[in-house]
Image (cartoon, rainbow, N blue to C red):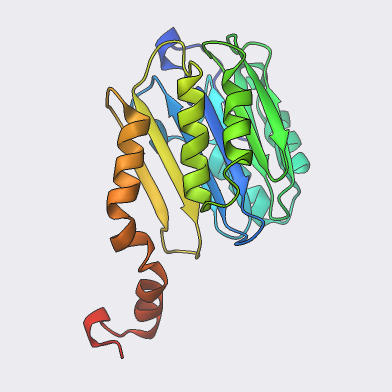
Amino acid sequence: MPIFYPTDRPLADSKCNTFAIIARCPQTKRFGAAAASKFPGVGAFSPCVDPEYGVVATQGWMNPALGPRGIELLRQGLTANKVLDDLLMEDPGRDLRQVAVIDRFGHCAAFTGSENDDVKGHLIGDQFCLSGNLLANEDVLPAMEQAFEQSADLELAERLLAALKAGSDAGGDRRGKQASVLKVAATPGFPYVDFRVDDHPEPILELERIYYSNRSVLIEQYYDWVDTVMKGIPLEKKG
């Protein structure tokens, strides 16, 4: 069923997710995404990550319904290109949107509407996609691409953080800094890496601090936690 997407433009500073990356790790098969913006609480709106089927990131003059709708289509087995086509076909405000999709095979598709503000665009690589609008300059996305590709020996979450930092160092959002988000999905129903910074003068550095300071508790013990929950055994009684 088509979803109604209003096309009335909000205030200029309500543009969301100025630069983002979505990716699939070829080794672990995990999906992840990260984004940063001069927009509060950006992680509440995008990206949407499914541990088995892929990722949808939406931005620009965002309609947040595109993310869950895209995940629904991915779960039906549609390819990234087909999901993107269907989302745009249903959306009368498509020229205002920026959408990136990665499917269960790691194939990517992206769209940057002509009504997004410059500097805007997207880059598609091997099982990852970068997108941005309202960028400070044309170096932001290539810097993110280089950082992601050169950190292939790291965990997916750390590669996503490296890309965000590189984008910010290259100029980032031309309006400034406020919020960031980092997500990596591993097991259906069990959050893995899911951190947000909603309002901070250095949101990417704060996101990095949160990730590394909590890694030993939430990430390194993740599969023990999943296992104990699924078996109904309290962690302290395991073994």
Residue drawn at the location 57% of the way across and 52% of the way down:
153
Rendered location of residue 82, percent (x, y): 77, 42
Determine whether, in the image, residue 112 is placed left or right of residue 181: right
User: Is 168 drawn above or below residue 69 in the view shown?
Assistant: above
Q: Residue 174's x, y, as percent? A: 46, 11
| Residue in view at x 33 percent, y 49 percent | 212
Horizontal side of residue 183 vs 208, given as left or right: right
Residue at far left of view: 236
Above/below status of 49 relative to 65: below
| Total marks placed | 0
Q: Position of residue 192 (x, y in %)?
A: 42, 58
The answer, for residue 221, to whether it is visible in the render is: yes
Q: Which residue occupies 52% across, 25% down?
A: 19
Q: Nearer the viewer, residue 208 or 218?
A: 208
Which quarter of the figure is the C terminus placed in? bottom left
Query: In the rendered view, does 56 fall on the left or right side of 223?
Result: right
Residue 170 position, x and y percent, is: 51, 19
